Image: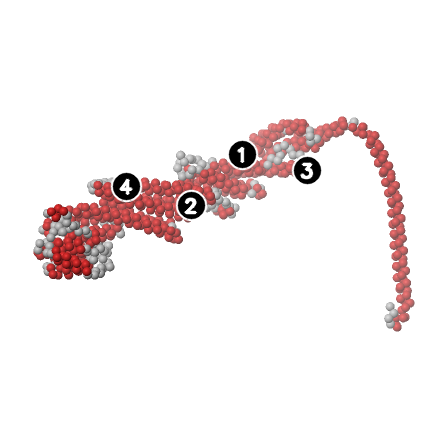
Amino acid sequence: MLQRPDQLDKVEQYRRREARKKASVEARLKAAIQSQLDGVRTGLSQLHNALNDVKDIQQSLIDVNKDWRQSINTIENLKDVKDAVVQHSQLAAAVENLKNIFSVPEIVRETQDLIERGELLQAHRKLMDLECSRDNLMYEQYRMDSKNTHDMNLIHAYFGDMQKLSEELAKQLWMVVQRSLVTVRRDPTLLVSVVRIIEREEKIDRRMLDRKKQTGFIPPGRPKKWKEKMFNILGRTVSIRIEGTQADTRESDKMWLVRHLEIIRKYVLDDLLVAKTLLDQCFPPHYDIFNKLLNMYHQALSTRMQELAAEDLEANEIVSLLTWVLNTYKSTEMMGNSELSPEVDVNSLNPLISQNVVDQLLSKYMSTLTSNIIGWLRKALETDKKDWIKETEPEADQDGYYQTTLPAIVFQMFEQNLQVAAQINEDLKTKVLLLCLQQMNSFLTRYKDEAQLYKEEHLKNRQYPQCYVQYMIAVINNCQTFKESIISLKRKYLKIEMEDTLSSSHTSMDATLDIIAKEGCSSLLDEVFMDLEPHLNELMTKKWLMGSNAVGTICVTVEDYFNDFAKIKKPYKKTMTIEAHRRVVVEYIRAIMLKRISFKNAEERKEGAERMIKEAEQFRFLFKKLAAGSGEDTEGLCDIIEAIAEVIKLTDPSLLYLEVSTLVSKYPDIRDDHIAALLTVRGDASKDMKQTIIETLDQGPSQPNPNYVPIFKEITVPTLTVPKLLK
């Protein structure tokens, strides 16, 4: 405190201040010590008092224990008093509910009348009063003596009619619930009353269950669970409504399933619309009545669809069921209806039937459809075959081409099945198309066989059937119609990426159709050439040389036939014309190679050759006329006849080798026997000359025209027979 000289003046001041501080501290210490001493003194005094009190209590307990032991016998004699107290308590509870107890029969009658009059809320109010009285009495009895079942039974029996009233009221409630979708339109207040009653009972159930947890007592018949029962009844009602829509059976109506499903669709949609717009307003929000009904309908529909799927359904019924389940159910016609949105989300709805069941139905459908298509095709072919033997000509299309109804029937059947399959899904449509084309392939093979049998039967008696030519033309035309229909069907129902899978099948069908058409054309030409046979036999004979009109008759006959053949569709008509031209030329050359005539001199050779050239021109004119508009070259074939005529017409035998070699170079498929036969017809070539010409030609190289179609290979030259040798 003293650090500088000038602070020495304040030494006395410092001393007084420190003295005061010291005096203050000493005073506080004295006060604290005094306070502690006073507290200790008081505590000791209280401890002495407590000790005295404990001794007094101990003595009192000893006295009480003595008194209790002395009065045990007296307490045992008070049992009657105890029973009186219990009875008094029961009587007090009875007195408290005395009014209700005496009026039970009257209240029961009033409640019964209210139920009969349909005043359900008032009836339930009285029923609640009765139940409350009974439950209070029973609770008092239980509380006083829970093992006294006799009195419990007595109370229960006295209120027995009340249980019947409860059941009767419940029956009325369930009737309203069952008809709730009808009631809500006519009298929604009645439905609201029912819901209020159910809500009251739910509250009482909760209260009784809470009391049971505390006391162990619950009145008989509780909990009633009327809310749960209400939803169960709604669920049963929905199931019955779905099942009850089947008005017909397969025996009474072939369209029973379609009708059944349409009624279901209409009923379900109408019911859900009513539930959304009206029913939802009659129930408390926590009931979530619309969604619960939606789930009930979905479950009932699922059950019903599974039942239908398990039945022995026909093919068309399977399609109807799958179309409804997979498409109609979630479409705008039903669950996807705009008026049900947004409460109903079709994407969240589970499938009505499992994929496994769908696959089983599709498998059964494809199996049945396969069998049906085979049967339909067989029946269609049999029907068409009956037409082939009719005495009237087949019908013609708008362009005048003969046809039968077979292609239309077949592809109409295919079209119908594809349209039906398309209603289900793309995958089934593709499968059905593949099936149709597969069966079409097999069918065309049978069609080919039947056309061949038709031809063979006709050959046994050419007068029968009368319209053989016309119906064979119709068969040929059907091939073209089939081709066009197959292409149209694929274009309409087959995805582009799937075309490769059908290319081989399509090629096979086209090949079969071409064979049928080719054989049909061939059989028609056979018909022509059977009629031409007598006239062909006149060619290259003495009669022919003398001026026979065989070629003129041949041309007229061919033209007459081709008036009918004009009703053959392109391209088969074009093929027919080319083949007829070819066969006429072949038959004419064959007549030359048959060596029916051997010209005696140059004059006959000249006359015969000129006749051949003239007749070649007739053929050329005829087939040019028949091929008009087709753009087909008809000149080349007749040139062969003219080339042969030039060989016969040649006057200088020394040039014969040159002429023959020219002929061979143009038509390299000419064989040695053809040249020998030609020289024999000419009549002036010796055996040595023939041999020399043939041997020389064999040594020379031949360079055929690449566009040349061999014709001589079809012509055989007859050898000498035994009768000729003898002659």
Q: In the rendered view of the protein, which quadrant contains the N terminus? A: bottom right
Can residue 407 be seen? no
Left/right placement of residue 167 relative to residue 564 reads right
What residue sits right under mark 3 in the picture?
Answer: 214
Q: Do the residues bearing badges 3 and 2 touch, measured as CB atoms within 8 Å? A: no
Q: Find residue 98 and report its image quarter.
A: top right
Residue 24 x, y percent position in the rendering: 89, 59
Q: Secondary structure at mark 4?
A: helix
Q: Find residue 32 and report its image quarter.
A: bottom right
Q: Do the residues bearing badges 4 and 3 touch, measured as CB atoms within 8 Å? A: no
Crowding at mark 4 (Cα within 10 Å: few <14, some 14-19, many 20+): some
Left/right placement of residue 468 relative to residue 547 reads right
Q: Amino acid at mark 1?
A: Met
Any mark on residue 424, and which? 2
Front residue of 171/564: it is: 564
- Measured along the vertical axis of the image, is residue 261 above or below residue 689? above
Tell us which disc is closer to us: 3 or 1: 3
Q: Find residue 88 and report its image quarter.
A: top right
Left/right placement of residue 662 relative to residue 61 reads left
Whole-number angstrom distance, CA of label 2 to CA of label 1: 40 Å
Crowding at mark 3 (Cα within 10 Å: few <14, some 14-19, many 20+): few
Q: Secondary structure at mark 1?
A: helix
Whole-number angstrom distance, CA of label 4 to CA of label 2: 35 Å
